[in-house]
Image (spheres, helix red, strand yellow):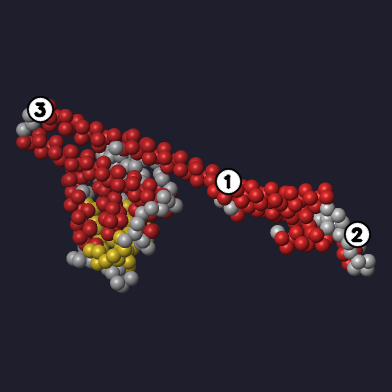
Amino acid sequence: IPVFSECMISFGNSCGFYYYFLVFSLAPFVIFSYEEKFWILFVFLYNNLLYVWFEFFGTPGTFEKGTLIYEEFIQELFRVNSVVSCLFFVALIMFYFLRNTNRIQKEMIRTNAHKDRIFSILAHDLKGPIGTMNSYLGFLTETNPDKEELLIALKELKKSTNQSYLVLENLLDWVRSESKKIPINLDTVNLSKMIQNAKDILNLQASDKRIQFDLQIPNNVLVYCDERMISTVIRNLFSNAIKFSYPNQNITVEVVQGPVFTELIITDSGIGMTQDQIEQIYAGKLFPTTFGTQGEKGTGLGLLVCSEMLKNQGCVMSLTSGQNLGTKIKIQIPSSM
């Protein structure tokens, strides 16, 4: 601005350079943050005062006769160029604000949609398991059940607890992934052990539908990943496979070791997915609540959380599915270095 002011003193208001002060007055709204509002106001007022001074109190520049700038046509050309340039810069600033406003509006719409989905999950998807737990606890405390009834009640309580925990874990992981606050701790871990642990956790859910796991995995397969994330992914995929499989079916789990990637392949013969659902998973979008083969309710979060977690640590997930044709999910995890 000081250099520009010096030029203005030399040329006066003959060439219209002082119009640029209007552009300079808008620049701080783009450059500074709201916390620096004092500087925004100062630069805005300072440049507007300079513009007013040259517009109403400035004098034409004094040019030597015979020089190019002495010609009135050239001075007029400079003035037109100054006005057009200023309008161009103002348009750029307005475009910047419009783009930011549009981005903020889209983010608000997305945030509100996610908030509504969270409330829906809390209100409906957790209500069922917690209601079941409350009913069985009431039954146990108000009656004197025999051993068989007690065992049935405890099994149902365990199943409802696991279901509630998985919903809450998915919900928290999804919220963290949306806010980019999931820490990633990569290390060499035993994939075979994680698969077996996930199977043990979900054995009760599988046994209720008489579903068997066919584990075709070598012992002590080592991969390089975040153990907590991959464990969550495997539990989600196993839970989905059970939920969408029919009673008395098998779920096949294979591990294929490679020098760069180790493949985890989970195959079921259940109700499968539509192409639209697969595309929404790849696009990172939530899809409507779905129901399992025995009316089990799903949040639509599980596969979305899995996809985000895998992407964040350099893993790749691919899906092959069709309605009533089952689903095959293949995950590529970096092999241990």
The answer to whether 52 is drawn above or below residue 223 in the figure is above
Q: Is residue 264 left or right of residue 99?
A: left
Count neighbours of disc 1 (C-alpha within 10 A) and say few if under 14, some if 14 to 19, many if 20 or more: few
Q: Which residue is mark 1?
A: 101
Whole-percent x, y for residue 130 in the image: 25, 35
Q: Quadrant of the C terminus?
A: bottom left
Q: CA distance from mark 3 to mark 1?
A: 61 Å
State how many labels appear.
Answer: 3
Under mark 2, the amino acid is Glu
Circle 3/circle 1 CB separation < 8 Å: no
The answer to whether 326 is drawn above or below residue 123 in the figure is below
Under mark 3, the amino acid is Thr
Q: Which residue is mark 3?
A: 143
Q: CA distance from mark 2 to mark 3?
A: 105 Å
Of callouts 2 and 3, the N-terminal one: 2
Whole-percent x, y for residue 32 in the image: 58, 53
Q: What is the quadrant of residue 161 in the picture? A: top left
Q: Nearer the viewer, mark 2 or mark 1?
A: 2
- Residue at the (12%, 30%) spot, across then down: 141
Q: Which residue is mark 2?
A: 72
